[in-house]
Image: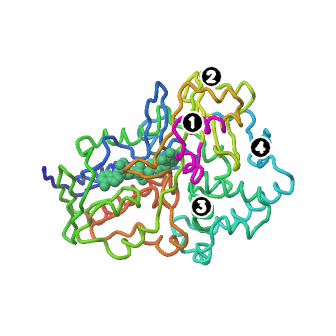
Amino acid sequence: MTTIDRDVIIIGAGASGLTAATELKKAGLTVAVLEARDRVGGRLWTDDIDGAMLEIGGQWVSPDQDALKETLAELGLKTYDRYREGENVYINATGELSRFEGDIFPVPAQTEHEIVSLIEKLDALVAEIDPDRPWGHPRAKELDEISFSRWLETQTDDAEAIENIGMFIAGAMLTKPAHAFSALQALLMAASAGSFSNLVDADFILDARVVGGLQQVPILLAERLGDDVHLGQPVRTVRWSDAGVTAVTDELTVNARRVIIAVPPILISRISFEPPLPRRQQQLHQHLSMGFVIKVHAVYETPFWREDGLSGTAFSPYELVHEAYDNTNFEDPRGTLVGFVSDEHADGVFTLTAEERKTRILTSLSHYYGDKALSPVVYYESDWGSEEWTRGAYAASFDMGGLARYGADLRTPVGPISFSCSDMAGKGYQHVDGAIRVGRETAAAIITDLKA
Ligand code: FDA
């Protein structure tokens, strides 16, 4: 067992922890980043799978994500636009496929009217929500007591409008069924992206990708931190008092003045705290859970859908793969599709054998793009649900009533312990941008305290 002394310990080498460590070091403080895995990046993971570079975790950058864009610029990373020329496809409840342009799906006129009206209502409500303090809304408690699906049913009885609007937050963002989270949680999700309209607009929310992959952000940050990043060091115990803190892994003991726990909030309880965290934290961490989505990549010899005049963008709340996009790498002659199988659908296909699951998923893709989609040269399913140090995707959200009840304390420091993660962000919530924002804010507060 090696013992080291630092000013600040950072537990977790994801985008949030590494940003915090970078800021602290810039301010002249000494740091030790302790990471459980044998790689940095957490939910950012760019890997070579059978000769194809795939983004197993987070990948897209949207125009409002200033914190992420600043970090990309600082690290000299370039972005490129997602391919979006041509027509999108939509499949309705009867399995009928239509091509369309713009944001609104080709649905009957009355359903379109209901969808537009729901978007307007949600935009108006979202405009009243401060993403950093959703619990501060005068109707926060009431909105947190009704599920998003039930709230939608109180607004319209058009099932297709409900399915479509529900999908944008449920399957596509929180990756939980719309009955499993509150209207307030849905409003936070939209407010964190600026508006509900932004979430509905794939050209906005899924605007650009990073040439060479988004995991370069944590990799380059970690390179700069050098020996201060310790891989393969799951923190088992944190001993704390007002005098300081000690983090213990299987090989290292690190003594410091402060610690930042930069892990998904659902993993905080995997660490033994001595003494235990206060009652409030013990309780609140039990009211969060990870969503669950399978991100599927299928690589083809060519982007064949483009020849058919398709953008690659496809949606259907009635399909196993509820959304799919052209995910071709920068200047790659091969074509890549990425699709998503969310929440209960993901549970369902994980009861099948790997071959059966692949067939079901590719068949769903073929409903959008035709039979050529059945024969990729590379096929890969990201399975974050079985990752010990993540346990789901994309991120954590509160159960019904949890956000209004506990949200305000999610990032409240406890003695020398601070918390930082994308899942605790306001703006950029559940996104890399939020991870970086919270990392910066957490570091700034510690710098102010320690330098005072
Ligand atoms: P993150 O979870 O990345 O890091 C936490 C780190 O803590 C991990 O490295 C973990 O191993 C470590 N850890 C945990 N417990 C530990 C312990 N006890 N001791 C030591 N280390 C411990 N975002 C986006 O902006 N655009 C996108 O397109 C997507 N898409 C997307 C797809 C998929 C499939 C996923 C899974 C996620 C996304 N996201 C995304 C979300 C985005 O990836 C995510 O919000 C951030 O990467 C989270 O960064 P954090 O640093 O907050 O946590």
Q: Can residue 249 be seen in this view?
A: yes
Question: Which secondary structure lies at badge 2?
Answer: loop
Q: Which amino acid does label 3 sit on?
A: Ala
- For the residue pair 332 and 380, the one nearer the viewer reads as 380
Q: Magenta stretch: residue 206 in it?
A: no
Q: Label 4 belongs to which residue?
A: 95
Per the rendering, the mark at residue 191 is 3
Compared to 99, does 346 lie above or below?
below
Q: Distance between the residues labelled 1 and 2?
A: 20 Å
Q: Distance between the residues labelled 2 and 4?
A: 26 Å
Q: Label 1 belongs to which residue?
A: 358
Q: What residue type is labelled 4?
A: Gly
Question: Which secondary structure lies at badge 4?
Answer: loop
Q: Distance between the residues labelled 4 and 1?
A: 20 Å
How would you rate the neighbour count of disc 2 (Cα within 10 Å): few for under 14, some for 14-19, many for 20 or more?
some
Q: Label 2 belongs to which residue?
A: 302
Would residue 172 be found to the left or right of residue 266 on screen?
A: right
| Highlighted magenta segment, given as a residue range | 340-364
**Mark 3 or mark 1: which is in front?**
1
Q: Where is residue 67 in the image (x, y as percent from the top left)?
A: 48, 50
Q: Where is residue 324 in the image (x, y as percent from the top left)?
A: 64, 40
Question: Which secondary structure lies at badge 3?
Answer: helix
Q: Where is residue 286 in the image (x, y as percent from the top left)?
A: 42, 68
Q: Where is residue 153 in the image (x, y as percent from the top left)?
A: 73, 67
Question: Which secondary structure lies at badge 1?
Answer: helix
